[in-house]
Image (cartoon, helix red, strand yellow):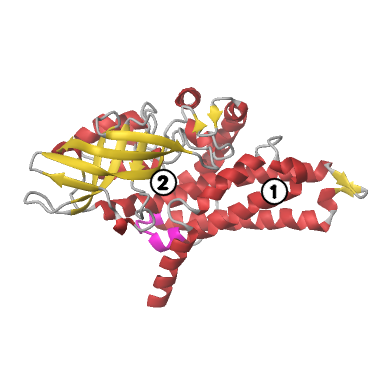
Amino acid sequence: MIDFSMPAELAAERDRVRQFVIDKIVPFERDPRLTAHGPTDELRQELVELARAEKLLTVQAPESLGGRGLSHIEQAVIYEAAGWSTLGPIAMNCAAPDEGNMFLLSKVANPEQVERHLAPMVAGQHRSVFAMTEPDGAGSDPAQLATTATFDGENFTVNGRKWLITGANGAKTWIIMARLAENPHLPAGPTLFLTDGDQPGIVIERTMNTMDRNYVAGHGVVRFDNLTLPQSALLGDAGQALRYAQLRLAPARLTHCMRWLGAAERAQSIAVAHARTRTAFGKPIGEHEGVSFMLADNEIALHQCRLTIWHACWLMDQGEKARHESSIAKSYVSEELFKVADRCVQVLGGIGISDETVVEMIFRDIRAFRLYDGPTEVHKYAIGRKVLRG
């Protein structure tokens, strides 16, 4: 049976989240603490406390950790509502990279790691990073991983360089991917490590200047300089990092789609309001075909993106990995929502490239969505290979 109805309780919570974002979070979009490198930790903490007061903090977390254990479909509905402001997911503690890291830790971390790292993240006390991407190749192709780890039977020693590490400045929990060298104690190969961010040997070289500013503390360049970690820092099994990365990335692709769908809806609402009131050549510009067709194309894209997301989420809720479908969703939704934002800028005309509205910020921020968690071309490559295999 195919059923597109939404439970009344879920619809009511969606509306509550959207109103919370409009009333309490949107006013912070002009806050000077929303810097060129994203929100500061001070701003993040203030937003988190607003969500906590409304019992909207980390609702996606397992019930055992104080969350609601939302299904993927429920996340899609709630995250879309939160995404009305790019600060909404930050307030509700369901923004990247923390949301994906919490999901991974809930699946892989041992009880001691859950208590030390995951529980404070769920409580909104800690931020985290996922340090995988490297300047010389590892990113979309993690097989090029150059950061190394050695193990002497007691401690690991990690050396290497990473960049585009979101939220590196101030993050208290670090998940690090490194290639474990051959040793007589543990399996070799790409391995994940979990550690505190204030360890000697973690050197944050600089924060990169990027066109987006929706992630706390921006994106850092990081060096691991003889970072020494105990065996207890091992996350999961040695040599299994690529498998764990896929465990994290498939749902994380979809949660990006959910949040940006909400932001694109916001841009569309602003463009529609402008098209109703701005006049040219004797009538509102929305009555001119050139503008009305752009708004129509946006409405079609938003609807199709939502259905694509929901289908992949439904498959995951049935217990399927849905890697193929999540790749379809990531590549399609990222491209279509960027077009939506671009058309909104066009409808707004001159003010579309100014900060008179948040559309220009959404446009800049959403551009990066076509790249992270797998560029469109990488996903299409994977989709194409599956198609050819039949």
Q: Which mark is residue 71?
A: 2
Picture disc at residue 201: none
Of residue 343 and residue 270, the one placed in the foreground of this image is 343
The type of residue carrying mark 1 is Cys
Amino acid identity at mark 2: Ser
Magenta span contains residue 318: yes
Question: Residue placed farthest to the right in the image?
Answer: 282
Give 71 or 386, whichever is nearer the viewer.
386
Q: Nearer the viewer, residue 296 or 65?
A: 296
When the figure is inspected, residue 12 is found, relative to residue 182, above or below; the finding is above
Q: Is residue 162 above or below residue 381?
A: above
Residue at 7 percent of width and 42 percent of height: 153
Reading the chain from its start, which is encountered first: label 1 or label 2? 2
Q: Is residue 249 magenta?
A: no
On screen, residue 88 versus residue 292, left or right, reads left
Q: Nearer the viewer, residue 134 or 129?
A: 134
Residue 324 position by quadrant: bottom left
The relative height of residue 296 versus residue 131 in the rendered view (above or below) is: below
For label 1, the residue is: 344
Give the magenta-colored segment's residue range. 316-327
Query: Mark 1 to mark 2: distance in Å?
Result: 32 Å
